[in-house]
Amino acid sequence: MKRLIASFLLIISAVSATVYARRTFLKEIDSLSDSIQNVIEVSENGSDSELNESIDILQKKWQSSGRTLHILVNHGEMDEAEQNMTALKETVKHTDRTELRIKCIEALNQLKNLRESEKISLENIL
């Protein structure tokens, strides 16, 4: 009987940890997506100082979210997104705003792919 109760408690803790990790993951992905959208909007309508400020905010958010995401996601999947996020400042210095928007859209697509690949499904479990 004790083994049955212990196994039941282990299953409940595993499910609880999974739900918590999924919520945290989605929160971080949504926050990063919103920040990238903000950079795109500022690149279309804002000044250079506003653009640099929004990129700084995005990169700070990436640094804090990146730690959490590296815990929850396979590192290989995070590398491309990390390269795009860290290259935004250089992109705006050396190219035009169109190239910056393209990089932002690529980053949004990478976050979307991360979200899809980390869905809790029978395929991902097996």
Image (spheres, rainbow, N blue to C red):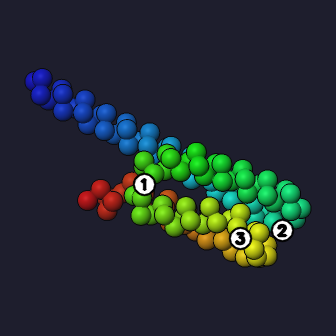
Residue 74 shown left or right of residue 42 in the figure: left
Secondary structure state at the residue bearing disc 3 = helix
Q: Amino acid at mark 2?
A: Glu
| Quadrant assignment for the C terminus | bottom left
Q: Residue at x 77, y 54 (%)?
A: 54
Image quadrant in which the N terminus is located: top left
Please tell me how crowded label 1 is: few (under 14), some (14-19), or many (20+) other residues with Cα within 10 Å: some
Residue that carries the numbered disc 2 in the rendered image: 44
Mark 1, residue position: 73
Nearer to me, 71 or 116? 71
In the image, which is nearer the foreground, mark 3 or mark 2? 3
Q: Count neighbours of disc 2 (C-alpha within 10 A) and say few if under 14, some if 14 to 19, many if 20 or more.
A: few
Q: Given the image, on which type of amino acid does mark 1 rest?
A: Val
Label 3 and label 2: CA atoms lie apart by: 15 Å
Dot 2 and dot 1 residues touching (CB under 8 Å): no
Residue 51 at least partly seen: yes
Q: Secondary structure at mark 2?
A: helix
Q: Nearer the viewer, mark 3 or mark 1?
A: 3
- Please tell me whether residue 20 is drawn above or below residue 76 in the rendered image: above
For the residues labelled 2 and 1, the Cα–Cα distance comes to: 32 Å
Where, by quadrant of the figure, is residue 86 drawn?
bottom right
On residue 113, the disc is none
Which secondary structure, mark 1? Answer: loop
Of pointers 2 and 1, the one earlier in the residue sequence: 2
Q: Which mark is residue 91?
A: 3
Residue 14 lies, in percent from the top left, at 31, 38
